[in-house]
Image (cartoon, rainbow, N blue to C red):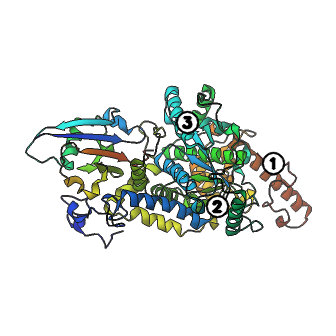
């Protein structure tokens, strides 16, 4: 079963260049045996969307400190963070609170 | 910082998930802890889930409590809000709007205006991008209905030298001779009752604070000015010095605007996160003595204009969520430019450090912040002009002996007699501003107002030294009779103010 996920990146000062300046991505994730959780979504984003400087977005398997994650407009801390299992039509929003300079 | 209240699941397992500090989602009830009913939308502080409406209440209340607790904004007072388009200052505008619109008893009572400093020149924006940013900001500012001022960083080249001198504190509000805060509020309320409370009864705004009309396009400064400004920034040898320079010019522009337009108060949108970063950064920069004025709620170094930081109790996360939930408009700009292969600034390193530490130790930033709250602003206060630092207006914190020790390492350029030397400025600067100054370019790349004021103080000190020598030669009294701590107006040529 396919999952269609909308994710948006809201970054300060130039970091949206990480994603070719595109702020909103509507994506259909391919079905795979592993569940689509945030952890795997991040891996997928890193491999498919991040054009440069991955360390500005990710650290290890999670997002870089200072980047907030909202799943369907709610704090991901309420949803299990990396372990949250994505549902079809979920909205994932990344907000950077860093100054970058 | 190793919090006992943490469940400990993150600490032992270094190998798998070193950064997770709590177990998966089933540990968090999804109900708001405040009202017990609403669905939680975010987690505040360490593990407190709040629903949207309780969060909104919490957020709005915090602003009014901050102002109420500190009692420095008097009713009817004109306050200048410094906005950057960023998350915190935009949230600040919204809080002011919220506060002014409340029902009469609880309403905030001051008269706000806005100021925006356009910094596109040093953020590597093309003229088109700068125009675009300005247009977006103007839309944002106009929508508030408050009077606003748009200024360019290039205007720092035209600042008067007097901006580097603390102005005389106004007697109307904060001096003992004026009414106390409570008296002022009471008489304001009485006055309102007599006038018949007419909703938002703000005094008429002067038309010059607004642009000519909605179609007026802000113009950029001419290229020569931009070039000159860039020269100062490009001559800076380190990213740290460049950041400090930017902050200095911006603050001086804002304070000068306040002075020109008659505002006694300026509100800056520094968040708790930003304040904590600033605290550790400034510590690293040698500004330990001045942490309280640099990061505290009030900053009175400019004398007649007081800077307040009403957002300093809000974390970056709270602000980001608030702006998202309640559609607070913001305008993003690129960061200050850096040179290729340049090491990051201390500001960036500290931010990275603190924010990173916060992930595993969620009380990090608030701990730093609360430690800062305990500091006293007294050490920063300069009792006279000759005691205040040329750049930051805090007290000169170096005595003669240390100065001698520093001198040999600081003198790079020793030009011929009669030409200005950087070394002559050293005695005018506090410890950390000397370090910054060392990393800025040659004197001719400094903004004119800094050089003018620097030269004036050097000449005055030389004259005083000369007088001292004369007196000693004549054997008339000790050096204490001609005290260098007299304010600079003692007959050596009155300083033009403003």
Circle 1 chain? B
Marks 3 and 2 share the same chain: yes
**Based on the displayed image, in which of its 4 quarters is residue A91 positioned?**
top left
- Mark 1 burial class by Cα count in 10 Å: few <14, some 14-19, many 20+: some
Query: In the displayed structure, would residue A62 be above or below residue B288?
Result: above
Q: Nearer the viewer, mark 3 or mark 2?
A: 3
Where the C terminus of chain B falls, by quadrant?
top right
Circle 2 chain? B
- Mark 2 burial class by Cα count in 10 Å: few <14, some 14-19, many 20+: few
Q: Earlier in the sequence, mark 3 or mark 1?
A: 3
Residue in view at x 44 percent, y 41 percent: B342
- In the picture as drawn, the residue positioned furthest to the bottom comes out as B4
Label 1, secondary structure: give it.
loop
Q: Which residue is mark 3?
A: B138
Q: Are marks 3 and 1 in contact (CB under 8 Å)?
A: no
Where does the image place residue B125, in percent across and percent down from the top left?
A: 49, 31
Q: Which residue is mark 1?
A: B495
Q: Label for residue B253? A: none
Q: Earlier in the sequence, mark 3 or mark 2?
A: 3
Residue in view at x 31 percent, y 73 percent: B4
Horizontal side, residue B488 vs residue A30: left or right? right
Where does the image place residue A93, in percent across and percent down from the top left?
A: 31, 45
Viewer-nearest residue: B172 or B498 = B172
Q: Label for residue B398? A: 2
Viewer-nearest residue: B78 or A77 = B78
One can see residue B49 in this view: yes
Where does the image place residue B409, in percent across and percent down from the top left?
A: 58, 51
């Amino acid at each position: 079963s396919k999952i269609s996920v909308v994710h948006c990146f809201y970054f300060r000062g130039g970091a949206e260049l990480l994603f070719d300046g595109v702020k909103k991505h509507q994506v259909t994730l391919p079905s795979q045996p592993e569940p689509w959780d945030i952890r795997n979504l991040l891996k997928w984003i890193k491999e498919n969307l991040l054009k440069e400087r991955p360390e500005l977005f990710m650290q290890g398997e999670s997002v870089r400190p200072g980047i907030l994650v909202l799943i369907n407009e709610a704090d991901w801390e309420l949803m299990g963070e990396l372990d949250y299992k994505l549902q079809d039509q979920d909205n994932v929003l990344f907000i950077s609170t860093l100054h970058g300079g | 910082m190793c919090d006992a209240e943490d469940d400990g699941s993150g600490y032992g397992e270094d190998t798998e998930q070193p950064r997770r500090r709590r177990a998966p989602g089933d540990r968090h009830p999804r109900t708001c802890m405040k009202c017990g009913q609403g669905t939680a939308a975010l987690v505040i502080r360490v593990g407190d889930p709040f629903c949207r409406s309780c969060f909104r209440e919490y957020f709005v209340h915090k602003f009014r409590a901050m102002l109420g607790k500190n009692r420095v904004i008097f009713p009817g007072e004109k306050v200048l809000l410094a906005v950057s388009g960023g998350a915190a200052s935009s949230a600040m505008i919204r809080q002011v709007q919220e506060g002014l619109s409340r029902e009469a008893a609880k309403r905030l009572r001051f008269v706000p205006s806005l100021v925006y400093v356009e910094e596109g020149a040093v953020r590597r924006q093309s003229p088109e991008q700068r125009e675009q940013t300005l247009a977006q900001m103007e839309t944002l500012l106009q929508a508030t209905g408050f009077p606003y001022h748009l200024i360019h960083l290039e205007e720092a080249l035209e600042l008067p030298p007097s901006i580097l001198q603390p102005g005389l504190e106004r007697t109307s509000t904060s001096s003992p001779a004026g009414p106390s805060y409570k008296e002022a509020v009471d008489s304001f309320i009485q006055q309102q009752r007599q006038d018949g409370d007419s909703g938002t009864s703000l005094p008429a705004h002067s038309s010059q604070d607004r642009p000519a009309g909605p179609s007026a396009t802000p113009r950029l400064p001419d290229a020569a000015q931009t070039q000159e400004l860039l020269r100062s920034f490009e001559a800076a040898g380190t990213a740290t010095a460049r950041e400090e320079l930017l902050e200095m010019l911006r603050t001086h522009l804002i304070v000068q605007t306040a002075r020109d337009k008659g505002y006694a108060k300026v509100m800056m949108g520094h968040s708790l996160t930003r304040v904590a970063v600033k605290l550790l950064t400034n510590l690293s920069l040698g500004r330990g003595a001045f942490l309280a004025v640099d990061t505290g709620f009030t900053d009175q170094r400019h004398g007649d204009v007081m800077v307040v930081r009403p957002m300093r109790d809000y974390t970056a996360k709270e602000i980001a969520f608030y702006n998202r939930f309640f559609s607070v408009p913001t305008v993003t700009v690129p960061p200050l430019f850096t040179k290729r292969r340049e090491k990051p600034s201390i500001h960036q390193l500290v931010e990275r450090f603190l924010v990173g530490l916060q992930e595993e130790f969620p009380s990090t930033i608030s701990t730093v912040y609360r430690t800062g709250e305990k500091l006293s602003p007294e050490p920063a206060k300069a009792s006279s002009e000759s005691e205040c630092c040329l750049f930051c207006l805090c007290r000169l914190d170096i005595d003669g002996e240390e100065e001698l020790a520093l001198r040999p390492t600081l003198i790079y350029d020793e030009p011929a007699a009669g030409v200005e030397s950087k070394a002559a400025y050293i005695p005018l600067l506090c410890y950390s501003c000397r370090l910054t100054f060392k990393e800025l370019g040659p004197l001719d790349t400094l903004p004119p107002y800094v050089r003018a004021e620097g030269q004036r103080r050097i000449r005055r000190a030389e004259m005083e030294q000369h007088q001292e020598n004369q007196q000693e030669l004549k054997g008339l009294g000790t050096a204490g009779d001609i005290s260098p701590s007299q304010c600079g107006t003692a007959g050596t040529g009155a300083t033009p103010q403003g």
